[in-house]
Image (spheres, rainbow, N blue to C red):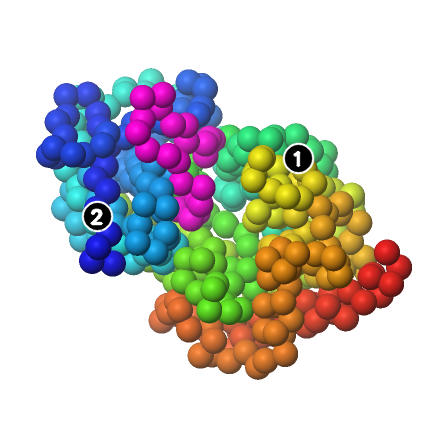
């Protein structure tokens, strides 16, 4: 890592000067979003406290720096050294929270981060007009909603709870998949017993025309962007908890081979990640009674159990099959994928977990996939996840496997974590056992 140069970024604002020569500026202009959906134009019923504005600003700067730093330029084509300067209203509080922020970023991106904080010029801050909403009109629940199986399962459950208060779903638009997200959201809306509100944000970074860099394809820091946006909304409307639903087996995502260690496996809802995020929030909150805690309500459930929860909440099977779960969708890799242009590749680990979950809940999965991992003519590189999975299922999974590359926080209950992983492995074994029959009937 000593041979990896540092990439320097600073988040600018009116009147600010760069920390030094060689620092690349970042701004909200990098985000592909309409002015009505910019951070200071959100459809919230109250203004957020300063600490929540800071968290959102830091998360957006991190995501922009992540996307503007190509891993191809590093010695191992993965690990980067990124320096970032961000203006915040309480630099001292953020400096106290810095060790937890660095641990969080290292976990989710696998990079070496250096973050410094400078005072934010209050006079440069956009002045929001007083909003004519009373606290009784605020949302009482806030959750992330991606249009995937897990977020659908949670939204379906909470939407059917009769309440005079709204459920606020925070969404991030994904280009080429807007219709999928809309279809799933409309299905929840049709069956909702309460007011349902949707907050849509952008996660698309565009490369400036005069830029000399290429955008990084991986987006490991987007989990922080999602969480920070939801926390910001919750803090504004005085909601003490944000729900980020992800089934326990994918949240832990234990490595199946040496090639999947560390940030090569997505860890945005891992218990270690949420632990450090919550510690950051605790340390930067100026008024503890206005703090927000981030939790995963599906941490103890497998994908199959989440599918059952969505089914039992009244979601039609075709809506579950219309959700988007793929980690390497051919529609995201135009010109780079050899597979048919479908939303789901059918081969990545999220697709395999999805297949096992729908199989568990319905006895079959009718989702159209670009390929089947057990196909005899499939290239070896395309079948790598299937081979790693089948080998992993033939071995015992222990506590040491859970902490092989990412620690667990002190509050973690390891017997419960092992239990959900093993139940998930049983669902995956059922998928593997079915594969020969599928191949014979193909």
Q: Residue at x 66, y 56 (%)?
A: 379
How would you rate the neighbour count of disc 1 (Cα within 10 Å): few for under 14, some for 14-19, many for 20 or more? some
Q: Quadrant of the C terminus?
A: bottom right
Q: Is residue 253 above or below residue 132?
A: below
Is residue 329 in sight in this rendering? yes
Q: Position of residue 194 (x, y in %)?
A: 63, 37
Kindly give the residue lying farthest to the right in the view shown.
441
**For this view, does 60 lie left or right of residue 305?**
left
Q: Is residue 416 above or below residue 24?
A: below
204 falls in the magenta region:
yes
Q: Position of residue 354 (x, y in %)?
A: 67, 55
- Mark 2 falls on what kind of element? loop
How would you rate the neighbour count of disc 2 (Cα within 10 Å): few for under 14, some for 14-19, many for 20 or more? few
Q: Position of residue 382 (x, y in %)?
A: 62, 55
N-term mark: 1 or 2: 2
**For this view, does 342 lie left or right of residue 15?**
right
Report the residue marked by disc 1: 180
Q: Residue at x 48, y 63 (%)?
A: 260
Name the foreground residue: 15 vs 274: 15
Which secondary structure type mostly characterizes the magenta part of the structure? loop
Q: Residue at x 14, y 21 (%)?
A: 15
Q: Which mark is residue 5?
A: 2
Q: Quadrant of the N terminus?
A: bottom left
**For this view, does 300 lie left or right of residue 258?**
right
Q: Position of residue 232 (x, y in %)?
A: 38, 38
**For this view, does 46 lie left or right of residue 382?**
left
Q: Residue at x 62, y 48 (%)?
A: 325
Which stretch did the figure color magenta?
A: 201-224
Q: Hey, which quadrant is residue 306 in on the image? A: bottom right
Q: Is residue 139 above or below residue 282?
A: above
């Amino acid at each position: 890592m000593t041979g990896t140069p540092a990439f320097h970024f600073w988040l600018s604002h009116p009147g600010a000067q760069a920390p030094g020569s060689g620092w690349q500026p970042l701004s909200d202009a990098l985000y592909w979003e309409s002015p009505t959906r910019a951070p200071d134009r959100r459809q919230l019923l109250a203004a957020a406290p300063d600490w929540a504005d800071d968290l959102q600003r830091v998360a957006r700067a991190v995501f922009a720096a992540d996307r503007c730093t190509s891993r191809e330029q590093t010695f191992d084509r993965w690990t980067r050294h990124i320096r970032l300067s961000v203006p915040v209203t309480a630099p001292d509080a953020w400096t106290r929270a810095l060790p937890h922020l660095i641990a969080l970023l290292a976990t989710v991106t696998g990079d070496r981060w250096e973050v410094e904080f400078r005072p934010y010029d209050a006079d440069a801050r956009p002045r929001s007009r007083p909003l004519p909403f009373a606290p009784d009109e605020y949302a009482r629940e806030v959750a992330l909603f991606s249009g995937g199986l897990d977020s659908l399962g949670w939204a379906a459950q909470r939407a059917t709870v009769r309440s005079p208060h709204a459920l606020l779903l925070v969404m991030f638009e994904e280009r080429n998949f807007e219709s999928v997200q809309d279809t799933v959201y409309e299905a929840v809306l049709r069956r909702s017993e309460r007011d349902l509100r949707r907050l849509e944000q952008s996660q698309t970074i565009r490369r400036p025309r005069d830029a000399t860099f290429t955008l990084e394809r991986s987006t490991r820091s987007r989990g922080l962007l999602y969480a920070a946006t939801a926390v910001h909304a919750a803090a504004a409307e005085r909601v003490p908890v944000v729900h980020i639903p992800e089934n326990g087996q994918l949240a832990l995502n234990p490595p199946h081979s040496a090639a999947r260690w560390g940030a090569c496996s997505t860890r945005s809802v891992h218990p270690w990640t949420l632990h450090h995020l919550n510690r950051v929030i605790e340390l930067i909150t100026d008024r503890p009674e206005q703090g927000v805690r981030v939790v995963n309500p599906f941490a103890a459930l497998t994908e199959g159990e989440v599918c059952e929860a969505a089914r039992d909440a009244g979601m039609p099977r075709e809506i579950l099959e219309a959700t988007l779960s793929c980690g390497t969708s051919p529609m995201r890799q135009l010109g780079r994928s050899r597979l048919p242009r479908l939303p789901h590749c059918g081969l990545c680990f999220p697709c395999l977990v999805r297949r096992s979950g729908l199989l568990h809940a319905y006895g079959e999965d009718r989702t159209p996939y670009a390929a089947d991992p057990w196909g005899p003519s499939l290239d070896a590189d395309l079948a790598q996840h299937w081979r790693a999975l089948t080998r992993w299922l033939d071995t015992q999974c222990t506590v040491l496997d859970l902490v092989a590359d990412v620690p667990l926080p002190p509050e973690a209950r390891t017997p419960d974590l092992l239990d959900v992983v093993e139940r998930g492995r049983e669902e995956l074994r059922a998928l593997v056992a079915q594969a020969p029959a599928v191949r014979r009937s193909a």
